[in-house]
């Protein structure tokens, strides 16, 4: 029997946390080889009735995205870069031999859900609506093959800060035992199967007193790639001459929408922004000699998160700068927040008004 999840007791969610304050509705579509996509249907957020032999459960044909909508200072709702997320959703689907959802359909679904569920969002500028579009294979068979039917759902939750409401530095743990992605794999797309294998490394990090694991490349195990589910940035120097650097895309890193945004914002703020391959040894050396002054991670959920300390079970631990959020990190973070809320010029039209 399908059960309907009731909306929050109060229409406006005051203390959302992250990932549990779901809004009241979802949008559903289905795809088949014969009929293509059905029309989107808006319905109450509810449990799913599925067969235990569904392909998506057994063989991992599951893709998803994550994007946010913010209430601007003028009261209007703006979704950040939905078309970029729609195109990445299409790339993920192609990688798993799944049908692509048209870009316009993706954006229209987002608009429709935000229009009906923005009522749950408070005026607190640290809160947002996090949208989770996902698609999964629905054929009932255990034959090892791509499904011939799929379902797309779009749901949402009201989000607070990923690491809490305050901007504080986190500690990270370099994972030498596990890798997130390998050449020719699925590291550059957003699929469900990428994430469960990361949990053990995350538990190691937490046992070491850290909030996140840092992933190294799968071949040489020495090049820095990502931090948890986020892209990483390094700051060399300080003040107006500070340089912003992030690991280059090698086919094993997720091409983050926020990553792309920050590379552009950094240059607009007067900093050079570039990509390069960086080893753990060089990262440590440049932090200890003062060349690297700040490190931060970014993502849709985490926005911009400063990194203050690194634990490396093989090479020793170190502190970045004085361990506190640095001025360049905070400046870039504020620029992104201002952009989300319509307080910064948006020449690229990244903020899609609903």
Image: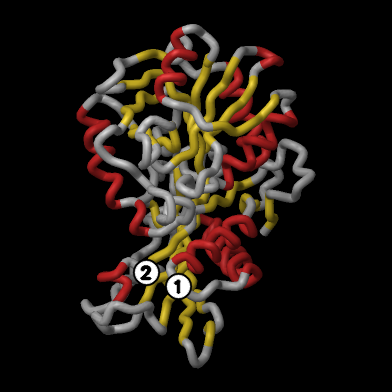
Quadrant location of the C terminus in the rendered image: bottom right
37 vs 172, left or right, is right
Q: Please indicate whether residue 206 sits to the left or right of residue 255 in the image.
A: left
Would you place residue 83 above or below residue 219 in this image?
below
Taking the spot 28% from the left edge, 77% from the top edge, the residue there is: 144
Q: Are marks 2 and 1 in contact (CB under 8 Å)?
A: yes
Q: Which residue is mark 1?
A: 97
Q: Earlier in the sequence, mark 2 or mark 1?
A: 2
Observer-nearest of 45 and 168: 168
Q: Position of residue 23 (x, y in %)?
A: 44, 59
Q: Secondary structure at mark 2?
A: loop
Pick whichever, 279 or 196, lies toward us.
Answer: 279
Residue most toward the bottom? 34
**Image quadrant for the N terminus?**
bottom left
Q: At 25% from the left edge and 70% from the top edge, which residue is drawn?
A: 58
Where residue 138 appears, x then y in whole percent? 35, 79
State which mark lies toward you, 2 or 1.
1
What residue is drawn where x is 54% and y is 62%? 91
Residue 342 picture location, percent across and down:
70, 42
Q: CA distance from mark 2 to mark 1?
A: 8 Å
Q: Is residue 1 visible?
A: no
| 263 displayed left or right of 160 | right
Q: Residues within 10 Å of mark 1 (few under 14, many from 20)?
A: few
Q: What is the secondary structure assignment of the residue under circle 1?
A: loop
Q: Residue furthest front?
A: 220
Q: Looking at the image, is 156 positioned above or below residue 260?
A: below
Which residue was labeled with disc 2? 61
Using the image as rendered, state which of residue 26 and residue 311 is in the foreground. Answer: 311
Number of numbered discs on residues: 2
Is 103 situated above or below 276?
A: below
Q: Is residue 143 above or below residue 270?
A: below
């Amino acid at each position: 029997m399908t059960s309907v999840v009731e909306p929050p007791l109060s229409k406006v969610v005051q203390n959302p946390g992250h990932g549990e304050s779901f809004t009241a509705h979802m949008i559903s579509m289905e795809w088949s080889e014969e009929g293509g996509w059905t029309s989107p249907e808006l319905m109450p957020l509810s449990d799913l009735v599925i067969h235990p032999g569904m392909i998506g459960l057994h063989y991992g044909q599951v893709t998803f995205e994550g994007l946010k909508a913010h209430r601007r200072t003028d009261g209007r709702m703006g979704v950040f870069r939905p078309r970029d997320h729609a195109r990445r959703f299409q790339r993920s689907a192609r990688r798993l031999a799944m049908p692509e959802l048209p870009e316009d359909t993706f954006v229209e679904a987002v608009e429709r859900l935000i229009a009906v569920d923005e009522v749950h969002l408070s005026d607190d500028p640290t809160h947002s609506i996090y949208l989770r579009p996902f698609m999964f294979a629905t054929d009932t068979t255990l034959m090892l093959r791509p499904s011939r039917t799929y379902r797309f759902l779009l749901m949402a939750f009201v989000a607070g800060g990923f690491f809490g409401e305050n901007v504080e530095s986190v500690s990270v743990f370099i994972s030498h035992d596990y890798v997130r992605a390998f050449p020719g794999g699925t590291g550059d797309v957003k699929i469900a199967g990428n994430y469960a294998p990361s949990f053990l490394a995350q538990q190691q990090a937490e046992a070491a007193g850290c909030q996140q694991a840092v992933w190294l490349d799968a071949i040489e195990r020495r090049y820095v790639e990502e931090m948890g589910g986020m892209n990483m940035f390094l700051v060399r120097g300080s003040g107006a001459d500070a340089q912003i650097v992030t690991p280059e895309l090698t086919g094993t890193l997720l091409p983050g929408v926020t990553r792309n945004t920050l590379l552009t914002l950094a240059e607009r703020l007067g900093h050079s922004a570039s990509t390069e391959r960086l080893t753990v040894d060089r990262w440590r050396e440049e932090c200890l000699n003062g060349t690297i002054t700040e490190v931060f991670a970014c993502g849709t959920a985490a926005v911009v998160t400063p990194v203050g300390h690194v634990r490396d079970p093989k090479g020793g631990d170190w502190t970045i700068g004085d361990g506190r959020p640095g001025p360049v990190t905070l400046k870039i973070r504020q620029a992104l927040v201002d952009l989300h809320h319509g307080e910064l010029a948006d020449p690229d039209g990244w903020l899609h008004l609903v």
